[in-house]
Amino acid sequence: MSRPSPPDRIGVVIPARDEQQLIGPCLDAVATAAAHPGVAGIPVTVLVVLDCCRDATAARCRARATPTLGVELRNVGAVRRAGFAALIGNDGLETARPAGGGPGPDAVSGSGSGPGGGALWLATTDADTRVAPDWLTVQLRLARAGADAVLGIVTVDDWNELPATLPARYRAGYVRLDGAERSHPHVHGANMAVSAAAYLRAGGMPGLPVGEDHALATRLAALPGVSVVSSTALRATTSARARSRVQGGFADHLRALALPRTGPPVRTDGRPVAEADPVTR
């Protein structure tokens, strides 16, 4: 398989469901990353996919001139898939719609190149997450070095709603973060990216209500010639909300870690939590 061209266009998908309190800082952080000197000359399109939103999330996006796509899916995997389909199908996107004006949630086709033939790069984060200022710059560096997909890490900004013992337990099961760049075993939908070409070869984002990020990473790793790279240099900070938006999500994982230990810690899906066990976000 020949190596794809380096990215010359970036699309960022952010799923959101009633995130009026957090979408502003999220979008501001992505805008800062897009304005980083390391991204100079690379157009960046940000798309917020509003899933069953009933609050002012859309208004917060409009205030920042950020395109939105409205869906009623209640499924984060399907929401990310709808956003990626819109970005793949539209160049110079302003507003994407699932019916009558753009691809539907399950539309996954094409070559992964824009109308001008350039290589499209797809990134995703979450509405309660703030990416690092060099978030896109690190992705471009890894992609230019041969990565077809990249997996980053997340730190938590505020543990106040959770037991005092939880931060240490979380860090004990996470890759060591000491400023040195290293690979890691974690997969977070809040911090991952992939070339459109590899994404399409993998069949797109699985329409799963939880674990869609792991499923996509597994599909990508199984493809011949596709390089999946993890790096602690790809950073994002997320919330530690006490109630998960989806069963088995990040908040459920944190609550499971907070339970008194009578044996090896166990995830909410029943699998043991080990240092090499990726954490879903």
Image (cartoon, rainbow, N blue to C red):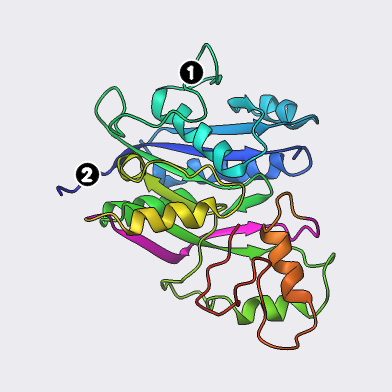
Q: Nearer the viewer, residue 199 or 11?
A: 199
x, y percentage for residue 276? 50, 77
Magenta stretch in the rendered image: 225-243
Marks counted in the figure total 2
Query: Is residue 145 a member of the stretch shown in magenta?
Result: no
Query: Is residue 235 a member of the stretch shown in magenta?
Result: yes
Q: Give the farthest residue toward the top.
A: 100
Local SS, label 2: loop
Q: Which sits earlier in the primary sequence, circle 2 or circle 1?
A: 2
Residues marked 2 and 1 touching at CB (< 8 Å) = no
Q: Give the farthest residue toward the left.
A: 2
Could you tell whether 222 is left or right of 59 in the image? Answer: left
Mark yes or no: residue 257 visible.
yes
Could you tell whether 225 is left or right of 37 in the image? Answer: left
Q: What residue sits 71% from the left and 38% below the top?
A: 17
Specify few, some or many for label 1: CA neighbours under 10 Å numbering under 14, 14-19, or 20 or more: some
Q: What residue sits 43% from the left and 49% below the top?
A: 193
Marking on residue 102: 1
Could you tell whether 159 is left or right of 125 in the image? Answer: right
x, y percentage for residue 127? 66, 44
The residue at which mark 2 appears reads as 4
x, y percentage for residue 161? 85, 64
User: Is residue 184 positioned above or below 19 on the image?
Assistant: below
Q: Amino acid at mark 2?
A: Pro
